[in-house]
Image (cartoon, helix red, strand yellow):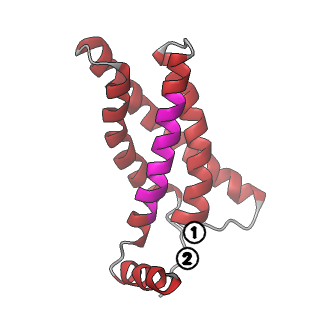
């Protein structure tokens, strides 16, 4: 089984798809953290506005660790470099939070859709925006294997 996984990873790396594959995998887990937190929080009586923010905080912390370590293999040598990377990550995620709230408002308030479905649909735009921010702005100095 390890050989099969190693071959699959090698093929994906040759095709320059490994970052996308790992981002989709960990992005899926991040989305799961976000949606589950949102659903639990709204069922606990929180408004969707507050539940969305709580879900965002937890998923951003989860995403930073997984993106840094396993998706983009970013290595920072100093605390200052780590804090700079984290601040860029937070800034980009605040931008995507704005996209999130914009779509949630549109879907729930204007179009009258349910909160759960709105949250699910919104995540598609968020995943794309966050990948672009992470790949081209935050973790762009990934060491290459070439």
**Residue for badge 1:** 73
Query: Hey, which residue is sitting farthest front in the picture?
Result: 1
**Does the magenta run of residues contain 23?**
yes
Element marked by disc 2: loop
Query: Is residue 10 or residue 93 the one in the foreground?
Result: 10
Residue 146 — which label?
none
Q: From the image, give the main secondary structure of the stretch colored magenta.
A: helix
Q: Residue at x 55, y 76 (%)?
A: 143
The magenta segment: 22-38
**Does the magenta run of residues contain 62?**
no
Residue 88 visible in the snapshot: no
Q: Which residue is drawn at 37% across and 20% down?
A: 115
In the image, is residue 125 above or below residue 53?
below
Q: Is residue 31 left or right of residue 55?
A: left
Residue 143 — which label?
2
The quadrant where residue 44 appears: top right
Query: Hey, which residue is sitting farthest right in the picture?
Result: 79
Q: Earlier in the sequence, mark 1 or mark 2?
A: 1
Q: Please tell me how crowded label 1 is: few (under 14), some (14-19), or many (20+) other residues with Cα within 10 Å.
A: some
Mark 1 vs mark 2, foreground winner is 1
């Amino acid at each position: 089984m390890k050989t099969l996984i190693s071959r699959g990873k090698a093929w994906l790396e040759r095709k320059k798809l490994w970052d996308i594959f790992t981002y989709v995998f960990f992005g899926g887990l991040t989305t799961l953290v976000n949606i589950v937190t949102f659903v639990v929080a709204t069922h606990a009586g929180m408004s969707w506005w507050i539940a969305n923010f709580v879900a965002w905080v937890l998923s951003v912390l989860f995403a930073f660790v997984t993106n840094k370590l396993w998706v983009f293999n970013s290595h920072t040598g100093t605390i200052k470099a780590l804090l700079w990377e984290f601040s860029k990550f937070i800034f980009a995620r605040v931008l995507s939070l704005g996209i999130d709230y914009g779509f949630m408002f549109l879907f729930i308030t204007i179009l009258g859709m349910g909160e759960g479905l709105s949250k699910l649909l919104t995540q598609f735009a968020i995943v794309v925006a966050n990948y672009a921010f992470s790949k081209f702005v935050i973790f762009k100095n990934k060491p290459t294997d070439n």
